[in-house]
Image (spheres, rainbow, N blue to C red):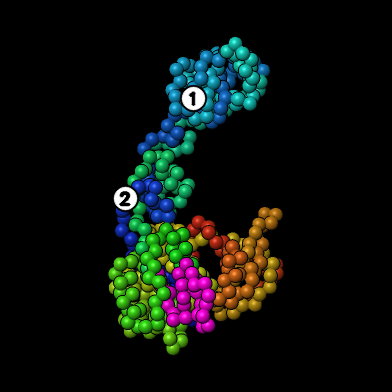
């Protein structure tokens, strides 16, 4: 068996980068920025109020409560028509530009309208209170985002703030998917005939591809016939950026994916020192990266997270390829194979400032119930074997933003 990190390193070493394109910001979620972005002006571009209240001179309200004459109102989107002078105030709304002369804002809750165009400042406020200075978020010329950043909602908001409407990104990967096996029927099948099972793997892989920012081309269920498999593989390799299959990569007499691809060449089939997900096919079909994942559904999920998802991010030019690892205290006992990296499905939560984790159910590679109940993978490294209640373990949470680089995980 080959160590998991050796396979991860081999996969990443052979991947092509996807082309760079420029597309509308609305369409870029999940893509990776291909250029550094600098602010073309201060953000915010002018000093403005952080709350609804009254723009005043701080020296006037030191001995609050005090009365001030209200000389105007400034709404967000309007420009001040006058200045604040000693003894006066201007009513101001959140986001409105600060008027000349004012150096603080008193929130409306600390005031009373006493009629006659006057306001009572009940509580004073230090100079600078509730004022957002020009450039307080980003100053003109600051690099706000580096190439290699994966774009999610916060990043899209920042790019919109600095006026980047058409960023340069690497294209969204098109991923061809199919499942193999004569025992499979579509997941919509209501009543199963003896010997058949519903195909859950394509739905799992589709969701994983789309979560990673890819576009799915679904080739369906491919029967165990070599001529059909060759045709589908050829079409997928010629039209997609990446091809991922499930099933047919182990040692069985009818594992035709392995048989056909061994004949074609360009794809290696290995036993990875991990559980679940020991059998894996990886290589290139006419230059297109190919992943042959196992047929068991939990193995598909774990193998995708370990190999395919980082590969997709690498092809998109992302700096961070792997999710964060947190330390957690085990709440369950488990014996595992010490010659493999074992990924247990678990449920982690934070209690009194520390993480705890327990096994979520049955751990065999066909048991989707435990995976559905899990929110993380518990990592039991090679050489450990048994984990017990109270042991500290590494936990990889589902759904987190990648925070670890290739170098951090694989070295070199």
Q: Residue furthest front?
A: 191
Visible residue check, residue 395: no
Left or right of 320: which side holds 67?
A: right
User: Residue 4 location, x and y as percent?
Assistant: 49, 73
Measured in 3D between alpha carbons, the distance from the residue under mark 2 to the one under mark 1, in whole angstroms, is: 37 Å
- Magenta stretch contains residue 367: no
The magenta span reads 177-203
Q: Residue at x 34, y 57 (%)?
A: 171
Kindly state the secondary structure of the residue where label 2 is placed. strand
Q: Residue at x 56, y 22 (%)?
A: 54
Dot placed on the residue nearer the N-terminal end, 2 or 1: 2
Q: Compared with residue 360, is residue 50 higher up or lower down, i.e. above or below?
A: above
User: Residue 112 location, x and y as percent?
Assistant: 64, 19
Q: Residue furthest bottom?
A: 253
Q: Which mark is residue 337?
A: none
Q: Residue at x 43, y 63 (%)?
A: 209
Kindly state the secondary structure of the residue where label 1 is placed. loop
Q: Quickly name the residue at label 1.
A: 75
Q: Residues within 10 Å of mark 1 (few under 14, many from 20)?
A: some
How many discs appear? Answer: 2
Closest to the camera, between mark 2 and mark 1, is 1
Q: Residues within 10 Å of mark 2 (few under 14, many from 20)?
A: some
- Residue 117's quadrant in the figure? top right
User: Which quadrant: the C terminus?
Assistant: bottom left
Viewer-nearest residue: 207 or 196: 196
Q: Residue at x 64, y 71 (%)?
A: 361
Viewer-nearest residue: 126 or 248: 248
User: Residue 295 location, x and y as percent?
Assistant: 48, 77
Visible residue check, residue 346: yes
Q: Quickly name the residue at label 2.
A: 22
């Amino acid at each position: 068996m080959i160590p998991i990190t050796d396979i991860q390193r081999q996969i990443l070493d052979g991947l092509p980068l996807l082309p760079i394109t420029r597309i509308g910001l609305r369409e870029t979620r999940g893509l990776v920025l291909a250029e550094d972005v600098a602010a073309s002006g201060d953000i915010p571009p002018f000093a403005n109020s952080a709350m609804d209240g009254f723009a005043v001179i701080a020296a006037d309200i030191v001995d609050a409560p005090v009365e001030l004459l209200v000389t105007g109102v400034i709404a967000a989107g309007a420009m001040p028509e006058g200045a604040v002078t000693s003894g006066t105030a201007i009513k101001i709304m959140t986001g409105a530009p600060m008027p000349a002369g004012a150096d603080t804002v008193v929130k409306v809750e600390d005031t009373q309208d006493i009629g006659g165009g006057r306001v009572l400042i009940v509580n004073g406020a230090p100079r600078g209170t509730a004022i957002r200075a020009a450039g307080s978020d980003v100053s003109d010329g600051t690099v706000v985002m580096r190439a290699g950043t994966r774009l999610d909602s916060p990043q899209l908001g920042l790019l919109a703030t600095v006026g980047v409407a058409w960023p340069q990104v690497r294209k969204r990967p098109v991923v061809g998917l199919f499942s193999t096996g004569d025992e499979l029927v579509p997941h919509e099948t209501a009543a199963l005939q003896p010997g058949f099972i519903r195909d859950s793997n394509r739905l799992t892989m589709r969701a994983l591809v789309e979560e990673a920012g890819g576009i799915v081309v679904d080739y369906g269920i491919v029967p165990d016939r070599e001529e059909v498999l060759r045709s589908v593989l050829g079409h997928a390799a010629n039209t997609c950026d990446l091809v991922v299959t499930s099933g047919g990569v182990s040692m069985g007499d009818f594992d035709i994916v392995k048989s056909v691809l061994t004949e074609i060449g360009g794809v290696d089939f290995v036993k990875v020192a991990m559980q679940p997900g020991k059998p894996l096919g990886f290589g290139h079909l006419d230059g297109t990266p190919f992943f042959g994942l196992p047929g068991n559904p939990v193995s598909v999920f774990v193998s995708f997270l370990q190999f395919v998802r980082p590969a997709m991010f690498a092809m998109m030019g992302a700096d961070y390829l792997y999710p964060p690892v947190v330390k957690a205290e085990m709440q369950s006992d488990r014996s595992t194979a010490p010659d493999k990296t074992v990924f247990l499905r678990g449920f982690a939560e934070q209690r009194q400032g520390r993480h705890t984790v327990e096994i979520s159910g049955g751990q065999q590679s066909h048991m989707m119930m435990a995976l559905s109940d899990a929110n993380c993978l518990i990592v039991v490294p090679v050489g450990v074997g048994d984990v017990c209640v109270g042991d500290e373990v590494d936990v990889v949470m589902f759904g987190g933003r990648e925070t670890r680089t290739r170098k951090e995980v694989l070295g070199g």
